[in-house]
Image (cartoon, grey):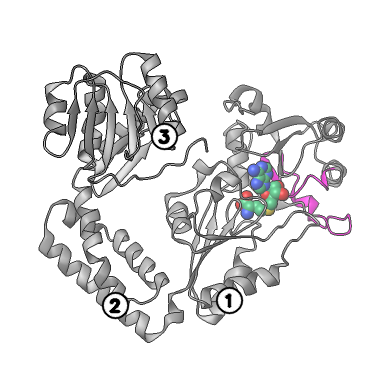
């Protein structure tokens, strides 16, 4: 981060504005809305500025005179003269007073973001000076999505905080309560329509039920969300995956879950890496199951993030079996499995009217360098084969398919890091793939796609990775 966004309390605080023209007036509007006491220094001052600074503030019809800035909470320079602005900035910085020079990030110690004002709800969007136009574009997107009455929703919640704190004594309980309330689209809609009385009714009944749950059995509140996070590109998560991830107090993730996905968890959520690379099992499966159980019983909401889909080579079944036996609440969220992600982003349809009428997902995970699979079932030339965990055993897979009668000319693709910015697709035939892989040295995770559909890759390859 180039800057830390913060919210500045300026109510009744003296702020110096050097400059009295149109640009200064624009900045002054924000300061005025934040309740600042405006002190304007400029030879000419617009009428609007005069009226904003009038009363509590001060107007000085002078040019900048290198004066001391002691006593000011912040200083804004908005004159057309860069030398003057630079001098104001230098003086303020020497006195450790936050200073902003309009449209001149190099002279600023703080910058002001584009603001969506749904007071008390405020959204600031900054491009760190890189592209104010982009920031403003985002602002209008947000403005059009969240009507101005969102401020009423925030105000309503603010007014209820004390009551909630009295009734729900623990922080976890309170957070869960608020989240449950926000999931209730009815109360939000009611508030947005301004129907305060009905909103009060819904609020009270939600609070009563939260209070009675908290009283009965605090341990009942924990839950596990077994979430399929997709093959890597964070945009391939489902809405439900995102919603539950953002609700979680603890996130357990393994190697297949990309950093972009973890970033979407709550900032204060605890993150636990549970590994799972070939031969590097950071936490054995049994320990993962036990950890899920223990955390949920402590009342935590636990997101177990899995790459792809939890029920496709994901041991999702094992992880929930114990939760089920112990009566812990859980939800399972399906995800886009690596086969779908890789096929799509490599331009290789898994089925196709001319080439393949079926597709088979197979684990290529070797045990003691052996692969015990029913090879004679994999010989149908109109069936696409997808091998997960197949790179280490690629030579065994390609040889066994040829030995059992699949043509050595059958096309095969090795899709490395599918859907990620550094995706690579290596194509060859069963006979030549080992040589190609030795040359290209793809790294995990990789997926093997075998069958005539691979021929379509050269034609349909639409995704151009950026890295
Ligand atoms: N549950 C997961 C699969 C877990 S098994 C899913 O549904 O996708 C792990 C294997 O998945 C890896 O060895 C690799 O073969 C495949 N895989 C997962 N993510 C991948 C990716 N981004 N690119 C290529 N293969 C991937």
Describe the element under mark 2 as helix, strand or loop. Answer: helix
**First along the sequence among labels 3 and 1:** 3
Point out the frontmost of discs 2 and 1: 2
User: Label 2: how many residues lie within 10 Å, few (<14), some (14-19) or many (20+)?
Assistant: some
Dot 2 beta carbon under 8 Å from ligand 1:
no
Separation of marks 3 and 1 at Cα, in angstroms = 45 Å
Q: Secondary structure at mark 3?
A: loop
Q: Is 388 covered by the magenta stretch?
A: yes
Decide: is 202 above or below 399.
below
Q: In the picture shown, does residue 172 fall above or below 359?
A: below
Q: Residue furthest bottom?
A: 216
User: Where does the image place residue 43, in percent across and percent down from the top left?
Assistant: 21, 17
> Which residue is the site of mark 1?
294
As for residue 12 lying within the magenta part, the answer is no
Q: Nearest the camera: 177 or 313?
A: 177
Which of the two residues, 133 or 299, is positioned nearer the viewer here? 133
Which is more toward the observer, 81 or 453?
A: 81
Query: Who's the residue at 44% across and 79% down the image?
Result: 220
Q: Nearer the viewer, mark 3 or mark 2?
A: 3
Q: Residue 394, how many percent across, how many down?
A: 82, 43
Frontmost of labels 3 and 1 is 3
In the rendering, which numbered label is found on residue 249?
Answer: none
Label at residue 167: 2
Looking at the rendering, which quadrant does residue 316 occupy?
A: bottom right
Boundaries of the magenta span? 366-394
Lateral position of residue 202 relative to residue 84, left or right: left
Q: Is residue 130 visible?
A: no
Residue visible at 25% across and 50% down? 120
User: Residue 57's image quarter?
Assistant: top left
Q: Please, what is the dominant secondary structure of the magenta stretch?
A: loop
Of callouts 2 and 1, the N-terminal one? 2
């Amino acid at each position: 981060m180039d800057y830390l966004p913060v919210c500045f309390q300026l109510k009744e605080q003296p702020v110096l504005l050097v400059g009295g023209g149109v640009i200064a007036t624009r900045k002054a509007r924000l300061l005025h809305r934040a309740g600042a006491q405006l002190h304007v220094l400029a030879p000419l001052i617009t009428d609007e500025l005069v009226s904003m600074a009038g009363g509590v503030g001060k107007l000085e019809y002078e040019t900048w005179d290198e004066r001391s800035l002691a006593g000011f909470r912040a200083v804004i320079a908005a004159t057309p003269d860069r030398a003057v602005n630079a001098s104001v900035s230098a003086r303020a910085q020497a006195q450790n007073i936050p200073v902003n020079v309009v449209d001149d990030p190099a002279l600023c110690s703080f910058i002001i973001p584009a603001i969506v004002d749904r007071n008390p709800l405020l959204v600031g969007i900054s491009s760190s000076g890189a592209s104010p136009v982009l920031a403003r574009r985002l602002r209008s997107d947000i403005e059009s999505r969240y009507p101005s009455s969102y401020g009423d929703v925030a105000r309503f919640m603010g007014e209820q905080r004390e009551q909630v704190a009295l009734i729900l004594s623990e922080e976890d309980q309170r957070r869960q309560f608020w989240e449950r309330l926000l999931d209730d689209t009815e109360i939000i809609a009611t508030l947005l329509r301004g129907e305060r009385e009905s909103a009060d009714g819904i609020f009270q009944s939600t609070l009563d039920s939260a209070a009675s749950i908290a009283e009965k059995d605090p341990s009942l509140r924990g839950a596990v969300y077994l979430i399929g996070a997709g093959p890597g590109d964070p945009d391939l998560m489902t809405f439900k995956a995102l919603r539950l991830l953002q609700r979680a107090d603890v996130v357990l993730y393994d190697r297949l879950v990309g950093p972009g996905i973890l970033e979407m968890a709550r900032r204060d959520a605890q993150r636990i890496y549970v590994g799972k690379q070939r031969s590097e099992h950071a936490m054995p499966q049994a320990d993962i199951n036990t950890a899920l159980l223990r955390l949920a019983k402590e009342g935590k909401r636990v997101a177990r993030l899995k790459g792809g889909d939890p029920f496709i080579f994901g041991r999702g079944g094992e992880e929930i079996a114990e939760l089920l036996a112990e009566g812990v609440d859980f939800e399972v969220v399906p995800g886009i499995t690596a086969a779908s992600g890789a096929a799509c982003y490599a331009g290789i349809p898994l089925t196709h009217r001319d080439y393949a009428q079926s597709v088979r997902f197979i684990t290529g995970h070797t045990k003691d360098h052996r692969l015990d699979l029913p090879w004679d079932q994999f010989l149908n030339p109109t069936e696409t084969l997808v091998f997960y965990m197949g790179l280490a055993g690629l030579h065994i897979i390609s040889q066994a398919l040829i030995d059992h009668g699949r043509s050595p000319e059958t096309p095969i693709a090795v899709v490395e890091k599918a859907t990620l910015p550094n995706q690579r697709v290596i194509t060859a035939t069963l006979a030549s793939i080992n040589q190609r892989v030795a040359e290209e040295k793809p790294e995990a995770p990789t997926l093997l796609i075998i069958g005539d559909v691979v021929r379509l890759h050269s034609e349909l390859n639409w995704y151009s990775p950026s890295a």
